Image: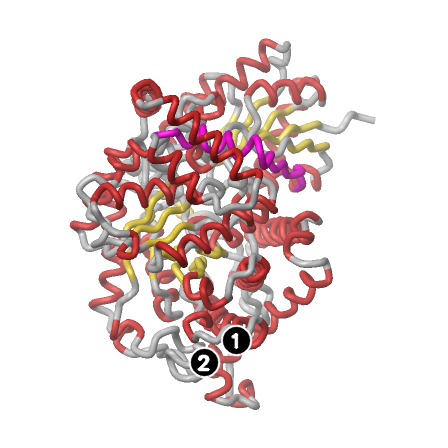
Amino acid sequence: MAGSTRTGSGHDTVDTTTTISGLPLKPLYEPSDLAGFDYGRDLGRPGEFPFTRGVYSTMYLGRRWTMREFSGFGTAEQTNARFKYLISEGETGLSTAFDFPTLLGYDSDHPMALGEVGKLGVAIDSLRDMEILFDGIPLDQVTTSMTINAPAAILWAMYLVVAEKQGVPWDKVGGTIQNDILKEYIAQNTYVFPPEPSMRLIVDTFEFGTKHVPKWNTISISGYHIREAGSTAVQELAFTLADGMEYVRWGIARGLDVDSFAPRLSFFFNAHNEFFEEIAKYRAARRIWAHVMRDEFGAKNPRSWLCRFHTQTAGVSLTAQQPENNVVRVTLQALAAVLGGTQSLHTNSMDEALALPSEKAVRIALRTQQIIAEESGVANTIDPLAGSYFVEALTNQMEAGAKDYFRRIDELGGVIPAIEKQFFQREIAEAAYRYQREVQAGRRVIVGVNRYQVDEPISIPLLQVDEAVQEAQIRRVQEVRRTRDNTEVRSRLAALRDAARGSGNLMYPILDAVRAYATLGEIMDTLREVFGEYHAPPVF
Amino acid sequence: MERKIRVLVAKPGLDSHDRGAKVVARALRDAGMEVIYTGLRQTPDQIAEAALQEDVDVVGISILSGAHRVLVPRIVERLRELGLSDVLVVVGGIIPPDDVPFLLERGVAAVFGPGSSTADIVAFIEEHVQKVRA
């Protein structure tokens, strides 16, 4: 019955002298660690260049971070119900998780979709599913983030058409599409097309957003997945901002004025275990980006200089063993994100090492944010850790580490050549392997896994998505194909094909195809025909 | 001199999470095994074919997408159809505890869930491959 409790090897094996990024950690930091520190140059006040202390002058006193829990599973009906549940429990923004077939642009009846439909997110095959997903949710009263990359333009088009049908003008619609293909090649691997056409599609969304959907963040330049794949915090910071710079270059190369699209670039970081390193990372990100945008790209609009970001607590840090401990991990990680000045936050649920969140578990995750916001008092003062010898020294080191990587990426010819040379992928795999060896050697502790283990079976109620979802989705997509005007669909897909071969903005023909209920798979297949598919070499 | 243990590390279906597969592949290589990594988006047929072509002793399936109940039994079935019933099949990734017996009943020798150590995976493979060769 009661298990035995075993501790790991002795305390002397644990590494306390370096951060997870390998930055040196001293037992004590003093004024000498901040020699040459200049408040105006290095920090500035919140809302003032270089924004180290925060992107807005009042931060949470003016506007609290958005509590935005990433959700999605099964059918659009099931996810719609989860959205409404979370709103009723106090979440302040929506965030959509799509299933793998949707992420990769396959309809639910595609052979590659077998077993995958609705398992890791909601299945969206056509506008019909999107209408159901947001049924009863007024799109002028809520902002929605959608974690979607290769097919981002299409899912965005579906969302915009739902808004249209609700009578909500596009200039009132707010939200984010992740739409960050570079990190797909680097880490998340939900790429479909090769880099060049993918970047073309992304710049199309920048242009379209500037013209028609001004409140929309057309990209969420992400480090979260880079970190989850095994990178250090410095790599997460460096690779994310390098990607960001690459998107700015492509926008400018299209002929866009940087100030026309840069204010709607947003970012997405991880909140991992090492509390102070994470806080330093966020502060360094803001300072680096402000300088890059103003001094390198010559952006004039102060809103172009802002590194606004969403944060998610580290999925990879969750344990299946003693899952209740995950509530504690998430609390500390969320606190780091808040002390780091995040604009939006997702907290993981305790059961996520094993499944998608149950209702009860996600409620606790939301309460974690609410308790931080409303009981702890930490949000009542802006950037409270500023001036700490330790935090400022660490912020400086994070910045230096990132700049070192920028030089190395430049030497390789830039982000896309570096991707093709597997630079990022190897750095990440190396860091992941090093971390695993450190854990197995007892130099890094995972409570419940290599220390304080308990011999008990893992027993926690888990959300199940059953195979009936796939059957229902297959029936639905086939019904959509049967009942729509197929002549119209064929004609719109042909128009899309022609546009893809040319250089016009693809959002317009995509919207037309979506309105006619062309399916996601059909639209993606049309683009696949023109753009081809990207294949990554299996390096480990 | 005894033949090195040959392992195919496979990612079936659409699952794009490859951190674990790469860490395990590297650990197995460091332990002296010959490792072939399939890369992403492999069908059960492609995995079984690769196992045959590469003449492996072990197929390690990495799956975090929730599609394991559908895809893993298909891989095992295809291996059998190709005459590879002696190949050791192990699974890693996100497998809810309740699904472990399901997989073991269908020909999987072991499931290495979150928190597993690569040392345990290496030891298991070495022990079982030796048994088969004996």
Location of residue A60 in the rendering, given as x and y in whole percent from the top left corner: 28, 72
Q: Amino acid at mark 2?
A: Phe
Residue drawn at (48%, 47%) of the image:
A505
Quadrant (top left/top right/bottom left/bottom right) for the C terminus of chain A: top right
Identify the residue shown where x is 26% and y is 38%: A133
Q: Which residue is mark 1?
A: A294
Asked if the stretch drawn in magenta spans residue A359, the answer is no
Q: Position of residue A242 (x, y in %)?
A: 58, 61
Which residue is located at x 59 percent, y 35 percent?
A533
Q: Are marks 1 and 2 on the same chain?
A: yes
Label placed on residue A450: none
Which residue lies under the disc numbered 2? Answer: A49
Residue found 71% across the figure and 58% down from its top: A413
Chain of residue at mark 1 = A
Is the residue A217 above or below the residue A340 in the image?
above
The reply to whether discs 1 and 2 touch (Cβ–Cβ < 8 Å) is yes
Q: Position of residue B89 (x, y in %)?
A: 57, 23
Q: Over which residues does the magenta segment extend?
A: A517-540
| Mark with earlier residue (1, 2) | 2
Is A526 covered by the magenta stretch?
A: yes
Give x and y (percent) for residue A442: 55, 54
| A397 to the left or right of A92 | right
Q: Secondary structure at mark 1?
A: helix
